[in-house]
Amino acid sequence: MTQVRLLPTVLIAVVGLLFIKVAHLVVYSDMSAVSTTPALAQEAPAPAADGGAAAGDTGNAPAPADMPAPNMDEEPPSLVDGMRIDPTQSSRSELAILERLANRRKELDERARSIEMREALLKAAEKRLQQRVDELKSLEQTIALATKKRDEEQQADINRLVAMYSSMKSKQAAQIFEVMDQDILLDIVKSMKSRKLAAIMGQMKAESASSLSAAIANSNSLEQNVQSLAADELPQIGN
């Protein structure tokens, strides 16, 4: 009976011991939680201080909303042969090339304008020269017509004198020929018939007849020389 009664007592003691153990664990855990909370409370103000400092600096530093947002559409620098190319540098190079091309274009335009101006001056000079040539040609034609008219008038006068002296007696005509100017006399005797001229010269003094014969011979020789020079083909200027 004594052993039977000890078993419940042992069970009660074991249950009490377990209860005490559990109670001890609960109390210990509560104490640990209480001791940890002040430590966390002491560490929490540090971020708050930093936040306060950050908030105090907001007056000087730009707000996050004012800062430019990154461009998500901007393409990253491209790679060429394993080398990264900066678009900014590429744009600068293109601008430099375009500037050189523009300067070159400007030089070519100025040179073209200079050439056009020279061509215009040359054309104006050629036009003035052509006008001068036309004026000289017109003047030459006028002189030629005037000379021809004068020669025709002189020849008409000589023909009248030839007819007059040919109708005169040889002795009378010889007396006039002896005192006449030799240049005029040459023009007259060249147009007279040889038979009539011989008759007149036969009535002239020997000295006058000899002088007239020499003048006629020299005049014929001069005319032949002039005709030979006119027949020669002289080189023209510019050919």
Image (cartoon, rainbow, N blue to C red):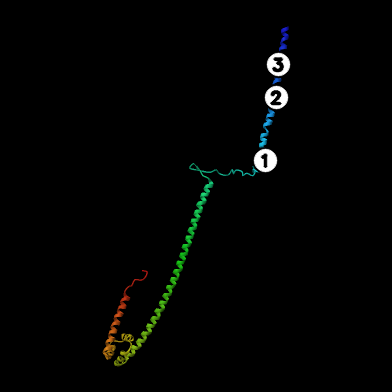
Query: Which is nearer the N-term, disc 2 or disc 1?
Result: 2
Amino acid at pointer 1: Gly
Q: List the residue tagged with mark 1.
A: 56
Amino acid at pointer 2: Met
- Mark 2–mark 3 contact, CB under 8 Å? no
Looking at the image, is 150 positioned above or below residue 106? Answer: below
Measuring 50% from the left and 56% from the top, which residue is drawn there? 103
Query: Which is nearer the N-term, disc 2 or disc 3?
Result: 3
Measuring 72% from the left and 14% from the top, which residue is drawn there? 13
Nearest the viewer among 237 and 190 is: 237
Q: Which mark is residue 17?
A: 3
What is the C-alpha distance between the residues marked 2 and 1? Answer: 39 Å
Residue 198 found in image quarter: bottom left
Nearest the viewer among 38 and 179 is: 38
In the rendered image, residue 185, in percent from the top left (x then y), is placed at: 32, 87
Q: List the residue tagged with mark 2.
A: 31
In the rendered image, residue 157, in percent from the top left (x then y), is placed at: 36, 87
What is the C-alpha distance between the residues marked 2 and 3? Answer: 21 Å
In this rendering, would 220 be left or right of 105? left
- Mark 1–mark 3 contact, CB under 8 Å? no
Query: Which is nearer the N-term, disc 1 or disc 3?
Result: 3
Callout 3 crowding tier (Cα within 10 Å): few <14, some 14–19, many ≥20:
few
Task: State the SS at label 3.
Answer: helix
Looking at the image, is 51 positioned above or below residue 96? Answer: above
For the N terminus, give its image quadrant. top right
Measuring 37% from the left and 85% from the top, which residue is drawn there? 154
